Amino acid sequence: MALMVACQASAQAHDTPTDAEMRDAHAVLLGLSQDGAAPDRNENNDIYYSIVDNPKAPRLVTRLEVSGAPCRARTTSALQFPEKWATLTMALVDLTRVTAVTAYASVDDMIAETNPIPFDSPDAEQIVLTGAGLYCSSRMSLSGESGASDGMCSDRLDITMADADEKERGRKALAIVADVCKAPAFVKK
């Protein structure tokens, strides 16, 4: 009996995502891990860099960290055009606020909001997560010209799952939102 309890506890501990796995899920949902881009990773945060071949193109650096609650993450992003001041954006995402999940087989269907399919369908290529105050951000210019910051909250996150790798990363992230975050959209009624 003790062995069975120990095995169950071990299985549950293995099912609990690590901090790195939680950051991976947030990165997928926030669109940071495009094409499976690997971040610079340390114990507490991940840093994502834009990959740009054109020296005149803007650069984006985003720091992602999961807070004390694994379903909430903070990002700090700096966007800079060459030889200009940067814009700094601080954001918070709370995956426990996901109240609806909708899937579509194409971008056109998602844009038109027609022909939704089950989110676990193999044909799902676009997933839309919605919930009040799901993603809130505050943006400010570092130019010093304006001290005002622009704050906003979005009720939507879009996930693209066009190829096999994106589908695998997307399904893993959705499983975390359902199982770990207990998002209302995934709770059976």
Image (cartoon, rainbow, N blue to C red):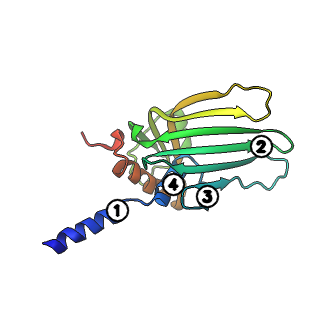
Q: Residue at x 50, y 60 (%)?
A: 20
Q: Nearer the viewer, residue 95 or 166?
A: 95
Mark 4 vs mark 2, CA separation in Å? 24 Å
The residue singled out by tag 2 in the image is 80
Of pointers 3 and 2, the one earlier in the residue sequence: 3
Is the residue 83 above or below the residue 25 in the image?
A: above
Q: Residue at x 53, y 39 (%)?
A: 92
Residue found at the very far right of the displayed protein: 83
Residues at marks 4 and 1 touching, judged by CB atoms closer than 8 Å: no
The residue singled out by tag 4 in the image is 23
Q: Position of residue 156 (x, y in %)?
A: 50, 36
Q: Secondary structure at mark 1?
A: helix
Residue type at mark 4: give it.
Answer: Arg
Residues at marks 4 and 2 touching, judged by CB atoms closer than 8 Å: no
The residue singled out by tag 1 in the image is 15
Residue type at mark 1: give it.
Answer: Asp
